[in-house]
Amino acid sequence: MRTNIVIDDALMEAAMRAGGFSTKKEAVEEGLRLLARRKAYQDLRALRGKLTWAGDDSVDWTTLEAEPMAVQEQPARYAAAAPKPTAARKRTKP
C-alpha cells in the first residue's frame, strides 16, 4: 500500500540506527511487524491460567523428530514433464 505520512526525523533516524536499516521503508515495516507481534503476544498472555491441558504428559514433545509429524501428502496423480526445447529460428534476409 502506498501512503504519505509525516514522521519525526529524529525518531526515524533513531529507529534506523537502532535496527540497522538502510531504508525508511524497512524501518517502518519492521516497526509495524513489531507492533502486530506485541499485540498477538498480549492476547496470548491474557489466556494465562485460563487453559487446561488434557494431553499426554508422558511424551517428551521436544525430542520428537519433525519428519514423522509432517503432513503425509498423497502423491500427485499426474506426471510433470520438462518442457520440450524449441528449435532456434533461422534468420532470413528480407
Image (cartoon, grey):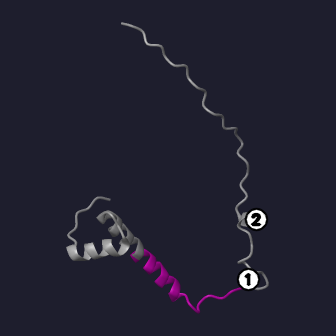
* Residue range (magenta): 35-54
Q: Is residue 74 magenta?
A: no
Asked if 30 appears above or below 90 in the picture, the reply is below
Q: Nearer the viewer, residue 10 or 53?
A: 10
Among the 4 quarters of the image, the one containing residue 31 = bottom left
Q: Which residue is mark 2?
A: 68
Q: Position of residue 50 (x, y in %)?
A: 59, 90
Tell me which amino acid carries mark 1.
Answer: Gly
Q: Residue at x 66, y 38 (%)?
A: 80
The first of marks 2 and 1 along the sequence is 1
Q: Nearer the viewer, residue 67 or 9?
A: 9
* Residue positioned most to the bottom: 49
- Numbered circle sitting on residue 55: 1
Asked if 27 appears above or below 87 in the picture, the reply is below
* Between marks 2 and 1 in the image, the one whose residue lies nearer the viewer: 2
Taking the image as shown, residue 73 lies to the left or right of residue 83, namely right
10 Å neighbourhood of mark 1: few (<14), some, or many (≥20)? few
Q: Nearer the viewer, residue 48 or 30?
A: 30
Among the 4 quarters of the image, the one containing residue 1 = bottom left
Q: Residue at x 37, y 73 (%)?
A: 19
Tell me which amino acid carries mark 2.
Answer: Pro
Taking the image as shown, residue 81 lies to the left or right of residue 88, namely right
Q: Position of residue 52 (x, y in %)?
A: 66, 88
Q: Residue at x 74, y 76 (%)?
A: 63
Distance from Cα at disc 2 to Cα at disc 1: 19 Å
